[in-house]
Amino acid sequence: MNLFTFLTIALLQGGEAATNPNAGNSWSMWVMLILIFVVMWFFMIRPQRKQQKELQKFREGLKKGDKVVTIGGIYGTVVEVKEKSLLLEVDSNVKIRVDKNSVVRDFSDTAQQQ
């Protein structure tokens, strides 16, 4: 029995309880509400938290020589790492300082694959 079948059966039972108050299946409404919240957490909140943790771990692990992309789409190589900022070299002798939170990914692996 898959999740869709279970939800369909529970909805049908909930509909019967709404039309027939003597059916006594008001608990099925609570079960459905709980299931909806569990499914939302499992498919929406949990993956987002996992992604945020991976991004935070990536930002903490940045080191000199890493090739990164910022939120604004600036490609650069890390020259200096401080607690809250990075110094990126974007071209020959062109360096900019950016906040660590603006770095979103490492493109050195994808550049090697292409």
Image (tube, rainbow, N blue to C red):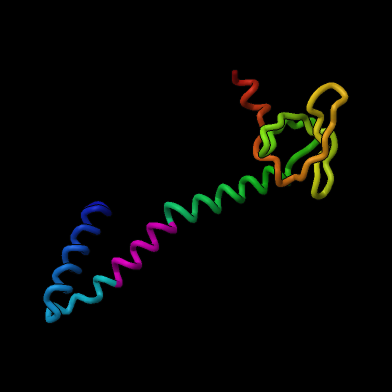
Query: Where is 38 relative to 84, above or below?
Result: below
Image position of 45 (left or right of 12): right
What is the quadrant of the C terminus in the image? top right
Q: Which residues are magenta?
A: 30-41
Q: Residue at x 64, y 27 (%)?
A: 109
**Furthest-top residue in view?**
114
Q: Is residue 33 magenta?
A: yes
Q: Residue furthest bottom?
A: 22
Would you identify the image quadrant in which residue 13 lies? bottom left
Q: Residue at the location (67% across, 47% down)?
A: 57
Q: Quadrant of residue 18?
A: bottom left
**In the current view of this chain or complex, which residue is farthest to the right?**
93
Of 62 and 36, nearer the camera is 36
Answer with left or right where residue 79 lies relative to residue 28.
Answer: right
Q: Is residue 48 magenta?
A: no
Q: Residue at x 64, y 22 (%)?
A: 111
Report the residue that reaches farthest toward the front: 72
Left or right for 91, reference 11: right
Which one is nearer the viewer's eye here, 96 or 44?
A: 96
Q: Position of residue 58 (x, y in %)?
A: 68, 43
Image position, residue 73 (x, y; %)? 67, 33
Number of numbered discs visible in the structure rendering: 0
Q: Main secondary structure of the magenta part?
A: helix
Measured as percent of width and height from the top left, residue 107 is found at 66, 29
Q: What x and y, as percent, mark residue 32?
A: 29, 66
